[in-house]
Image: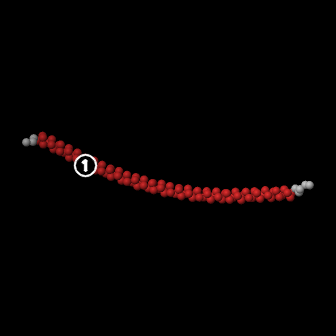
Amino acid sequence: MVGTSELEEMRRRLEALEGEVARLREESATTRTLAAMADRDVAEMRAALRGHTQVLGALRETQLEQGQATGRTLDAHGRMLEQIAGVVGSLVQGQAQILDRLDRIASPPQD
């Protein structure tokens, strides 16, 4: 038969175990809550990263388009400058001819 002191010891140990189980249950619940919060944080970070990646992709496309447009504009300006240079060259030649004729008129031939 179990003595009173042994029964008291078992009761004390049972209460300690029940307290430990309750504490472990609380810790487990807290751990699950923290894990769920961490999972939600990771999901939010992934969504933000996807958003940033999409923005960077759109920015890249825009820069490519702008680069192509700038190239076309520079080509057009280059062609226009070539045309202007041709016209200026013709004007310079015309002025040289005019000056040559004026020189001939201003100084008649000397015999």
| Quadrant, the N terminus | top left
Farthest-out residue, right: 111
- The structure residue drawn at horizontal position 30% and vertical position 51%, both measured from the top left corner, is 32
Q: Amino acid at mark 1?
A: Arg
**Residue 109 or residue 107, whichever sits in front:** 109
- The structure residue drawn at horizontal position 47% and vertical position 55%, both measured from the top left corner, is 57
Question: In the rendered image, which quarter is residue 51 located in?
Answer: bottom left
Q: Residues within 10 Å of mark 1 (few under 14, many from 20)?
A: few
In this picture the colour scheme is: secondary structure
Image position, residue 99 (x, y; %): 81, 57
Q: In the shown orientation, is residue 34 left or right of residue 109?
A: left
Q: How many marks?
A: 1
Farthest-out residue, front: 111
- The structure residue drawn at horizontal position 12% and vertical position 40%, both measured from the top left corner, is 5
| Quadrant, the C terminus | bottom right
Image position, residue 47 (x, y; %): 40, 55
- The structure residue drawn at horizontal position 18% and vertical position 43%, both measured from the top left corner, is 13
Image position, residue 93 (x, y; %): 76, 57
Instruction: Identify the element where label 1 is drawn.
Output: helix
**Residue 91 or residue 47, whichever sits in front:** 91
Q: In the shown orientation, is residue 28 left or right of residue 101?
A: left
Task: Identify the residue position indicated by label 1 in the image.
Answer: 25
